[in-house]
Image: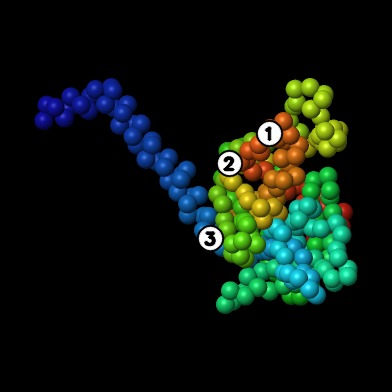
């Protein structure tokens, strides 16, 4: 009995007990919601995620997915501009196409056309044929915070792994300028000079993206709102130009540029 009374009265014991209780109270508020929300949020986002590529009506490989995209309005998809070929092979009746997995491991294909492109931010807006698909909810760049939980869903290595959407968890590691400083003027490329003349912020993520992930929606885990468009190829050319071997860092274009592209195209 005396031992118990002595422990309760000791200030260090009271401090340790308080810290332990605080830690237990904090655990459900940090790890719990992320683990609980992501499966449900990803399942909802998958309905709006598509693969983007080309379709050839004659000769050779007909279906050729190149990247990912997501529905932003009825029959409208946003993807990276570099995913969409600048020229189509008319002789082979090549068209832009949107792909989605269907039952029995089959794939549905919908012809699409380029509505508008923002080459500066590597974004493209497409309109596809057929029935409308569920559209995502768009967030705002002003609400993005470094350190927040996020995820992206798309079709990595789509030509090798098939049309199976994959979800990757990430955090927004940094909000940084697209063009990084260089040691001297001799290291500047024409592309970097262009970026420095019209700089904008990009999102740096602590997750790995793969060929085919370009154009995937980056979204807030809790709300499901899209906050960016995954992009590595385009951003790395400016951001990592001084690095001999590209890093495994993934980047994303903030969602406000998607809003601007849609507004200019008159799409809501």
Q: Position of residue 122 (x, y in %)?
A: 79, 48
Few, some or many residues within 10 Å of mark 3 (<14, 14–19, 20+): few
Q: Position of residue 164 (x, y in %)?
A: 59, 64
In this rendered view, identify the residue nearer to me: 102 or 146: 102
Q: Which residue is mark 1?
A: 244
- Residue drawn 20% across the image and 26% down it: 7
* Numbered disc in front, either 2 or 3: 2
User: How far from the left and from the top, in percent, is residue 183?
Assistant: 75, 22
Query: Can you see residue 201?
Result: no
Q: Which mark is on residue 80?
A: none
Number of numbered callouts drawn: 3
Q: Quadrant of the N terminus?
A: top left
At 80% from the left edge and 65% from the top edge, which residue is drawn? Answer: 96
Q: Nearer the viewer, mark 3 or mark 1?
A: 1
Which residue is label 2 attached to? 206
Question: In whole angstroms, how far apart are the C-alphas of marks 3 and 1?
Answer: 40 Å
Q: Nearer the viewer, residue 133 or 120?
A: 120
Choose mark 1 or mark 2, whichever is in front: 1
Colouring: rainbow
**First reached walking from the N terminus: tag 3 or tag 1:** 3
Q: Are marks 3 and 1 in contact (CB under 8 Å)?
A: no
Quarter of the figure with the C terminus:
bottom right
Q: Position of residue 251 (x, y in %)?
A: 67, 43
The residue identified by callout 3 is: 40
């Amino acid at each position: 009995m005396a031992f118990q009374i002595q422990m309760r009265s000791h200030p260090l014991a009271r401090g340790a007990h308080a810290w332990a209780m605080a830690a237990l109270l904090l655990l459900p508020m940090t790890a719990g919601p992320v683990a609980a929300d992501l499966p449900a949020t990803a399942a909802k986002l998958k309905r709006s995620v598509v693969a983007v590529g080309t379709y050839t009506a004659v000769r050779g490989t007909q279906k050729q997915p190149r990247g990912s995209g997501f529905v932003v309005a009825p029959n409208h998809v946003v993807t990276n501009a570099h995913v969409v070929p600048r020229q189509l092979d008319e002789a082979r009746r090549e068209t832009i196409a949107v792909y989605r997995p269907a039952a029995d491991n089959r794939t549905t294909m919908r012809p699409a056309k380029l509505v508008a492109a923002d080459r500066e931010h590597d974004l493209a807006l497409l309109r596809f044929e057929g029935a409308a698909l569920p559209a995502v909810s768009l967030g705002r760049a002003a609400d993005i915070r470094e350190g927040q939980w996020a995820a992206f869903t798309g079709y990595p290595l789509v030509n090798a792994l098939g049309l199976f959407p994959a979800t990757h968890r990430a955090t927004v590691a940094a909000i940084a300028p697209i063009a990084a400083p260089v040691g001297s003027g001799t290291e500047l490329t024409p592309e970097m000079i262009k970026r420095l003349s019209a700089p904008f912020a990009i999102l740096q993520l602590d997750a790995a993206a793969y060929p085919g992930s370009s154009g995937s929606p980056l979204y807030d885990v809790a709300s499901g709102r899209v906050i960016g468009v995954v992009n590595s190829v385009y951003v790395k050319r400016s951001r990592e130009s001084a690095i001999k071997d590209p890093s495994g860092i993934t980047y994303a274009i903030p969602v406000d540029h998607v809003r601007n592209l849609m507004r200019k195209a008159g799409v809501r």
